[in-house]
Amino acid sequence: MKKNRVILACLAAVLALTVFPAGGEAASQVDKINKEIKQVRDQMQAASHNRNQAEKDAKTVQVQKVQTAESLKTVMAEIDTVGTRLSQVQNEVRDTTENLQRTAKELDDAEKRIGKQDDRLQSRIRMTYMNGRVSYLEVLLNAASFADFLSRLDSLHTMMSQDKVILEERRHDKELVEEKKQEVESQLTEVKGLYAKIADYQQVLSDKESEKQQLIAAYDDKLEELGEISEEQEQLLLDLAAKESALIKKKNALKTYYTGGKLGVPLKASYRISSPFGYRIHPITGKRKLHAGADMAAPEGTNIYAAESGVVLVAQWWTGYGNCVVIDHGGGLWTIYGHIRNGGIKVEKGETVKRGQLIAEVGSTGNSTGNHLHFEVRKDGTPVNPLPYLK
């Protein structure tokens, strides 16, 4: 009986070991499961944190982009302000230079008149010297008759009057020469001062352009086009070009180069149309406005060529256009090339250029956030789609 109890106890112990694992192993499995659960929970929390952080980062980037856009608008407004002042000074230089040239011509004319007057007086002195000292009274007393006396008297009055007029003209011209010399000196000093102002404004513009480029480069994503050439800026440019065109026509130097057909493409290198001609909604202002030209995106420094032969009306900085060239091809047809890089204008106002001649280099000056050529075709001052004009 006792033996049977021992056997039963042993069987119970074996069964217990078989059905229920040892305490140590049970604890190990639980720990393993708990660790896996914790790991999943940690991963879930990390994912949630990452998602929240990503949302925060996205909001931060969006805020920064808005701030960058606002900063860009501020910088471009400052560029417009400085550019307007630069344009005004450039116009002052043009007007002062024209006045200086007129004054210099008046000075030359006065000096030439004095030279002729001196020649006439010297001729009279030479005649007197060669013929000996002649008394006016002796001339009169040697008259053969009363009629001869009157004739000689009239001749003497004429000679004396001529001498008096020559001397008076010479005195007046001498005074005029001195006056014009002072004007020339004054105008030269003014021109030098204006050129110093231009250099200062160009340096400020260069600094502002660098600041603008740094803002644009702050993000890898391409910023929307923030540039906007206002109607006022366009009109001011057209008014200036019209004035120059009228002056050139007055000088009979403007021929009709364009007689119809296709214009040459201003960019020979690869480019893409980033913004065509036509009405568009501005991304910042939300206003609908005519984009008066076609934007040709190309790397900075890409050569720009004249679309047709003509005379350069404008070759300078011009507010929203940045560095700009305007060419008059005659027959009321103009082409405009905007956003040229600093130092990229290769022609001068009044210069005659040929079709396909290098005139500038692509940049992003003025109201622009990327390197491109803003190309316009104007017919009698009205913007037309330039693309059908091109080959």
Image: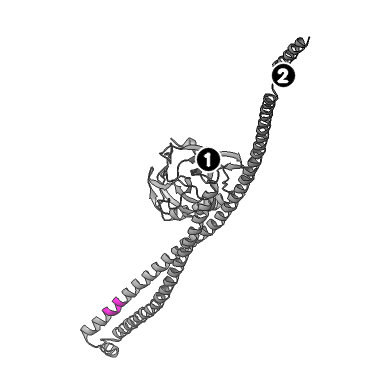
Whole-percent x, y for residue 251 in the image: 41, 56
Q: Mark 1 points at which residue?
A: 384
Name the residue at 31% across, 77% down.
118
Q: Mark 2 points at which residue?
A: 20
The quadrant the C terminus occupies is top left
| Residue 137 inside the magenta-drawn segment | no
Against 390, is 98 above or below? below
- Secondary element under disc 1, as helix, strand or loop, is strand
Q: Quadrant of residue 44?
A: top right
Name the residue at 68% across, 35% down.
45
Task: Count the marks.
Answer: 2
Q: What are the residue bounds of the magenta stretch?
A: 118-123
- Dot 1, how many residues are within 10 Å of its Cα: few (below 14), some (14-19), or many (20+)? some
Q: In the image, what residue type sits under mark 1?
A: Val
Q: How far apart are marks 1 and 2 (CA)?
A: 93 Å
**In this picture, residue 196 sits left or right of residue 9:** left
Against 32, is 86 above or below? below
Whole-percent x, y for residue 57 in the image: 63, 41
- Secondary element under disc 2, as helix, strand or loop, is loop
Q: Which of marks 1 and 2 is nearer the N terminus?
A: 2
Camera-side residue: 84 or 311? 84
The quadrant the N terminus occupies is top right
Camera-side residue: 262 or 87? 87
Dot in front, 1 or 2: 2
Q: Residue 3 carries which label?
A: none
